[in-house]
């Protein structure tokens, strides 16, 4: 059975903040901070594990492996980015079954053509609306846990086809059985409000730092009408900035960073990733 916490929070009307996680260090820190729902981001998991852009290059098998590892590491329920479903309708069926078996609590599918591109980059193209409707129907039918495993339907139509077409598609995706709607890359608060006012289905806000959508406080997003927000790039950009500062100082001076670049305590980090259990095991069994 999928972790029911996402469904339960949505039913209670509790606004959800889900940080994007790019690797298992980020997952471990999210555990420490106490997030109970997290987002497995395709862009940043691809960047961290393959060193490649989010352009449809990562395969189903590669992403399934990363999502399964994220589920094992995270103490929170995992919302998983599955791009376009990695192919046609049979691929979508296979993807849903695989992700559900891996333990994720929700799967995100989008209506871009394959190979897809990051939602906040140019030159995106969308499939015909009916193609995506069929994918959503297949995904909804494929899941074994019909109650707790949720389907998130994302439209990227705003960039190439306009807001009106994006609204038309979201309506069709809700009717097809999507549990959560994802309006990708709205360019103003007005567009965000329009989308939330149009649908009873829970709406997801994508707070992608550096992207096309205004970054708004969680309280404002909730007031607008969103049910949850993901922050796909926050941990990755924060980590990259800290690493750049530390490495720049090392290259320039030959020593590690000073007090202006905080370092996580090493002993605490050992505990964070499970070394205490190793030490306890050794103390009991080592000869």
Image (cartoon, grey):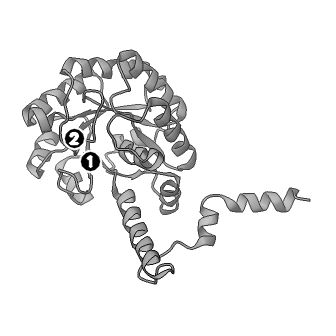
The answer to whether one can see residue 170 in this image is yes
Q: Which residue is mark 2?
A: 184
Which residue is the extreme one toward the right?
A: 287
Residues marked 1 and 2 touching at CB (< 8 Å): yes
Q: Residue at x 45, y 75 (%)?
A: 251
Rendering coords of residue 108 (x, y %): 35, 34
Rendering coords of residue 171 (x, y %): 17, 27
Q: Secondary structure at mark 2?
A: loop
Is 286 situated above or below 131?
Answer: below
Rendering coords of residue 283 (x, y %): 84, 62
Q: Residue at x 52, y 57 (%)?
A: 25
Q: Secondary structure at mark 1?
A: strand
Q: Is residue 235 left or right of residue 177?
A: right
Between the C-alphas of marks 1 and 2, the distance is 7 Å
Q: Residue at x 28, y 17 (%)?
A: 134
Q: Is residue 91 left or right of residue 123?
A: right
Q: Nearer the viewer, residue 254 or 104?
A: 254
Q: Which residue is mark 1?
A: 206
The image quarter containing residue 241 is bottom left
| Quadrant of image for the C terminus | bottom right
Return the mark for residue 142.
none
Rendering coords of residue 113 (x, y %): 25, 27
The image quarter containing residue 277 is bottom right
């Amino acid at each position: 059975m999928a972790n029911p916490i996402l469904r339960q929070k949505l039913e209670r009307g509790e606004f959800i903040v889900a940080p994007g996680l790019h690797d298992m260090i980020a997952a471990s820190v999210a555990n420490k901070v106490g997030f109970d729902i997290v987002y497995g981001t395709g862009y940043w998991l691809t960047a961290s594990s393959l060193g490649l852009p989010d352009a449809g290059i990562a395969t189903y098998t590669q992403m399934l492996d990363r999502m399964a590892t994220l589920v094992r590491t995270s103490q929170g329920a995992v919302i998983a980015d599955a791009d376009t479903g990695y192919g046609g309708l049979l691929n979508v069926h296979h993807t849903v079954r695989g992700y559900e078996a891996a333990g994720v609590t929700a799967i995100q599918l989008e209506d871009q053509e394959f190979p897809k591109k990051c939602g906040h980059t140019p030159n995106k193209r969308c499939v015909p609306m009916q193609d995506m409707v069929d994918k959503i129907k297949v995904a909804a039918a494929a899941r074994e846990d019909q109650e707790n495993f949720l389907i998130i339907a994302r439209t990227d139509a705003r960039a190439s086809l306009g807001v009106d077409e994006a609204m038309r598609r979201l309506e069709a995706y809700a009717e097809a059985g999507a549990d959560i709607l994802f309006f990708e890359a709205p360019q103003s608060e007005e567009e965000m409000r329009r989308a939330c006012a149009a649908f009873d289905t829970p709406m997801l806000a994508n707070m992608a730092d550096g992207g096309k959508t205004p970054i708004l406080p969680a309280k404002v997003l909730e007031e607008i009408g969103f049910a949850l927000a993901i922050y796909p790039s926050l941990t990755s950009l924060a980590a990259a900035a800290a690493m750049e500062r530390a490495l720049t100082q090392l290259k320039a001076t030959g020593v590690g960073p000073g007090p202006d670049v905080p370092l996580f305590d090493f002993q605490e980090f050992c505990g964070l990733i499970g070394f205490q259990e190793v030490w306890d095991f050794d103390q009991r069994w080592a000869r």
